[in-house]
Image (cartoon, grey):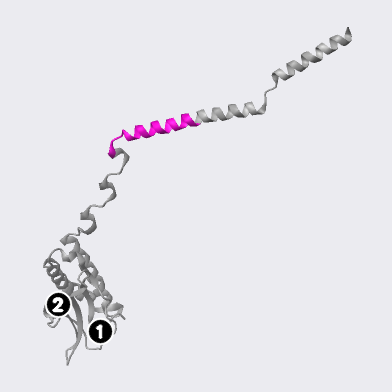
Amino acid sequence: MKLWFQKISIVLITFMTLGMFIPPTYLDTNAQSSKGLDDTDADGDLASLSEEDAGLPEDELDLDDDDLLLDDDLIDGETLEEAIERITDEAKEQTLRKLGPKIAKQVEDDVLNAIMPNIEEVLNTIVEQAEDNRYQNFVVAEEPAAGYGERIFNIYDSEANEDVAKFHVRRDNRPKNGYWFNFHYHLSSDGFEEHHELGEVYWDKNTPPKWMS
């Protein structure tokens, strides 16, 4: 009796154990199926999002051309007044550099009061007479000539690659009257041949130092 009961117990335990066992292959199959469903849902969400974006107005999806391109007036729209101010400021700076500390110490005020207003007036005329807004291409070019050279600066047309005007200062030694600084300019219209006077500044009877010294 006991033997028969033991056999039945073994059969029941074996049956229960086999019934609860799940093969790994079955688990893998279920996992892959679930992943496939998740991917399908994700693709559907992306497709839905794309369709919603497609329905937005164009100006909400892309930047307007005005946001990407600068206005033409901001690129090359320098006004006449701005060009005059730019050129005269640079001309003044170059003129003072030309004098140098030693000469400027003695005659800077005379140059600023007697010469610079005439230079500015000539520059105004040159800029105002420029055709087709060429003044936007005008720049103060060339370094002042050191030593005994006359050059202060040139007005250069960067588009035409040519000088428009040349501003110089010459040392004049007048017997019994000392040294004078003669400021003048030349224009391209006459091949830079004629001297156009800007004014003179007296130095002294002693020889002045070299320019830019």
Start and end of the magenta stretch? 39-58
Q: Is residue 105 above or below residue 63?
A: below
Q: What amino acid type is highlighted by mark number 2?
A: Ser
Report which residue position mark 1 lands on.
149
Report which residue position mark 2 lands on.
188
Expressed as whole percent of the image width and height from the top left, the position of residue 169 reads: 20, 81
As drawn, the residue found furthest toward the right would be 2
Q: Residues within 10 Å of mark 1 (few under 14, many from 20)?
A: some
Expressed as whole percent of the image width and height from the top left, the position of residue 148 reads: 26, 85
* Residue 105 seen in render: no
Q: Quadrant of residue 139?
A: bottom left
In front of the other: 105 or 88: 88
Q: What amino acid type is highlighted by mark number 1?
A: Gly
In front of the other: 22 or 62: 22
Residue positioned 25% across, 88% down in the render: 207
Q: Is residue 44 magenta?
A: yes
Mark 2 to mark 1 CA distance (whole Å): 20 Å
Q: Which circle's residue, 2 or 1, is located before the other in the chain?
A: 1
Q: Is residue 144 above or below residue 62?
A: below
Q: Is residue 114 magenta?
A: no
Residue positioned 23% across, 67% down in the render: 89
In front of the other: 202 or 18: 18
Residue positioned 70% across, 22% down in the render: 21
**Quick check: 117 left or right of 94?**
left
User: Which quarter of the rendering shows the C terminus?
Assistant: bottom left
Which is the main secondary structure of the residues drawn in magenta?
Answer: helix
**Quick check: 25 left or right of 170?**
right
Q: Quadrant of residue 179?
A: bottom left
Expressed as whole percent of the image width and height from the top left, the position of residue 20 reads: 70, 19
In front of the other: 191 or 85: 191
